[in-house]
Amino acid sequence: MASEPAFTIGVEEEYLLVDLDTGELVDAAPEGLIEDCDHAFPDQVHPELLQCQIEIGTRPRQQMADVHQDLVDLRSIVGEVASRYGVGVIASSTHPWASWRTQRYSVQERYRLLSEHMQAVMQRMTICGMHVHVGVEPDALRFDLLNQVTYILPHLLALSTSSPFLEGRDTGLKSFRIALYSELPRTGLPEQYDNEADYQREVDVLVETGVIQDASRIWWDIRPSIRYPTLEMRISDVCTLVEDAVCIAAIYRCWLRMLWRLKCNNQRWRRYSNFLISQNRWLAMRYGMERGLIDFGKRALVPYAELLEELLAIIEPDAEHFGCAAEVAHARTIVERGTSADRQRAAYTVAKAAGADERAALAAVVNGLRAETLAF
């Protein structure tokens, strides 16, 4: 049997910054906020595309308990520092009523170039996500697993949804973030490549023609990272609750190890077309866990809870290997109580029933998001 990959894991989360008094999305991060956070956690807190956003990243870890603690520590310090500037932090993939038209780009050259090239399409990206890096070496294995792992991406999206509202209205989708993100080029499900050389040849075409600067401008739902020897899962909304984020990261990591186990036994996960997987991606984006997803083998729409039990049984040996059975099993709790998108809608409904006007009801949603983001 080939030596096992490291399967180290790291999580990146993006947050929105809101005025503590009004809940409004700020149009510019207070001067000094990022620097103060960076002082506490060097190189782990960064600006994002828009000044209303902030990104954090854990260190590469072997234990999911360490990932959990890193996220708690990072959220705590960002929340504490932001409060000194009169700003709150929400882990939500959209803000309930903010308009993208008032937002300002960050000053970094990378974002200036993107805004110049993408224009209003890029400025509409007032959205936040969660990215999970899992270490997979060598390169040949990384691309082999890339071709098989897409099957589970809609399942992970359904567990993470946190973007039902946009610009003051319920969009009808659990993850409107995905709809917005799909306006960008080079998004969605990845192409299938036999090896890294085939992938690199296509990237080189775009680089040599000046369309992109490098492969970091490829924004698929999952991609080989340009910075690390990892497979970076990017389909998830950012989770408002830390334990939900850790659960989803753990399931993704275990799924990759399960695929590696199959490979060691000269087996592989059946490859399904992007056409089929995209249908499940849409169902997860639209309904979350409500309608279930398609079981391609059964040719039937199956309740999400049933699919989850099958998934958990498949990765049970891997959860035991990583010592994260409890983190993985937390997915059952998410199914029972719903995602952030479900709780946001519930908070809005309760506020309206109590007599709140539209803005006050949406403000109740923001208040709930602020509380949950820092609820450990």
Image (spheres, grey):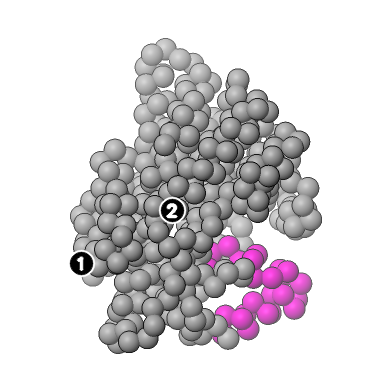
- Quarter of the picture containing the C terminus is top left
> Which sits earlier in the primary sequence, circle 2 or circle 1?
2
How dense is the environment of label 1, judged by Cα within 10 Å: few (below 14), some, or many (20 and up)? few
Q: Position of residue 143 (x, y in %)?
A: 48, 78
Left or right? Give the position of 289 relative to 100: left
Q: In front here: 129 or 191?
A: 129
**Quarter of the image where the N terminus is located:** bottom left
The part of the image, by quadrant, that contains residue 340 is top left
Q: Where is mark 1, residue-wise?
A: 298
**Place of residue 53 in the rendered image (x, y in percent of width and height, measured from the top left):** 63, 42
The residue at which mark 2 appears reads as: 66
Q: Secondary structure at mark 2?
A: helix
217 part of magenta stretch: yes
Place of residue 178 in the rendered image (x, y in percent of width and height, measured from the top left) = 50, 51
- For the point 75% across and 76% down, the residue is 209
Secondary structure beneath dot 1 equals loop
How many numbered discs sit on the rendered protein? 2
Q: Sort mark 2 into few (<14), some (14-19) or many (20+) by Cα contacts within 10 Å.
A: some
Q: Which callout, 2 or 1, points to the residue nearer the camera? A: 2
Q: Amino acid at mark 2?
A: Asp
The residue positioned 74% from the left and 37% from the top of the image is 32
Foreground of the two, 62 or 51: 62
Residue range in magenta is 198-223
Q: Position of residue 180 (x, y in %)?
A: 56, 49
Q: Residue at x 49, y 47 (%)?
A: 71
